[in-house]
Image (spheres, grey):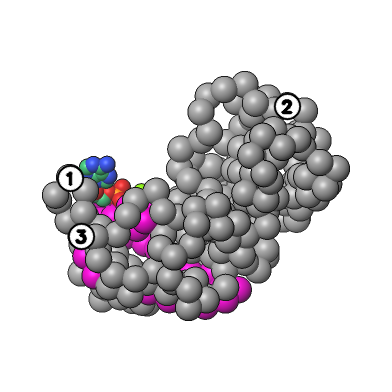
Amino acid sequence: MRLVLDGVAVTIDGTPIVREADLIVEPGSFAALVGPNGCGKSTLLRTIYRALRPAAGLISLNDEDLRKLKHRETARRIAVVAQEYPAELDFTVEDVVLMGRTPHKRPLSRTTGEDLQRCAEALERVSATGLARRSFVTLSGGEKQRVLIARALAQESSLLLLDEPTNHLDIRHQLDVLHLVRDLGLTTLAALHDLNHALEFADRIYVMDTGRVVADELTPEVIARVFGVRAVSRTQYVFERLKEET
Ligand code: ADP
Ligand code: MG
């Protein structure tokens, strides 16, 4: 599914937060969104998944204007791994993943065998089958992220949006999440904190600065201009996983 943003602007309480954002995420590709804290990455993602309404511009999925889709239809096409975890309620992991089935069900309809099957497949895909009966709130950060990705998979959407999915994870779990997401092969747009991770994992990097998408590649010049730091390449450790995700 191709995601296109054309001149998207977002205003919150009269303050422009995003201005004229243009970007394209090609079908099956992984695009990263980077930029300093507060530049508008989360706001832009929230606008794409329709938690916020754009003040101007067009967002389309496969040439279809998002505004023309019913919210339920949007939920079938777009899966989100947001920064906030689901409310601190005592849901089991299986319940959390089953929430991904909601857009495929009629309101108040029961969980079907197919729902459970999809849920089990999704948990297996993220190597979290053993967690199904655990309470979500008791999981480690890395386990929570994998379960939220499973919920997105159970949703069977073709566009995946992630907001800083590696936050608070150690290096090994950061790599697990990034490999996992890339290997899903979905059309993916992820706000990423770590510039080296963006360079390593993304097919395309969009750089935001004070509400604008100012570059579609991450060069030392762009890094200097946007982040105010010099990018120096020097001998350093490159981390590779010793074995496949645990
Ligand atoms: P990022 O994710 O890049 O760190 P955000 O999209 O969270 O940036 O925020 C961009 C700017 O918008 C910030 O200045 C933030 O304070 C402001 N902002 C975000 N959400 C709101 C809101 N609900 N009300 C007022 N200001 C907001
Ligand atoms: Mg953010």
Residue 1 included in the magenta stretch of the image:
no
Q: Residue at x 83, y 47 (%)?
A: 114
**Separation of marks 1 and 2 at Cα, in angstroms:** 40 Å
In the image, residue 185 sits, relative to residue 47, either above or below, namely below
At 39% from the left and 48% from the top, the residue drawn is 51
In the displayed structure, does residue 66 sit left or right of residue 230?
A: right
Say which residue label 2 marks.
134
The three-letter code of the residue at mark 3 reads Thr
Q: Earlier in the sequence, mark 1 or mark 2?
A: 1
Asked if the beta carbon under badge 1 is closer than 8 A to the nearest atom of ligand 1, the reply is: yes
In this view, 147 is above or below 231: above
Residue ID at (56%, 58%): 73
Q: Secondary structure at mark 3?
A: loop
Q: Nearer the viewer, mark 1 or mark 2?
A: 1
Tell me the quarter of the picture where residue 53 sits: bottom left
Residue at label 1?
13
- Type of the residue with mark 1: Asp
Is 31 a magenta residue? yes
| Camera-nearest label, 3 or 1 | 1
Q: Is residue 24 left or right of residue 132?
A: left
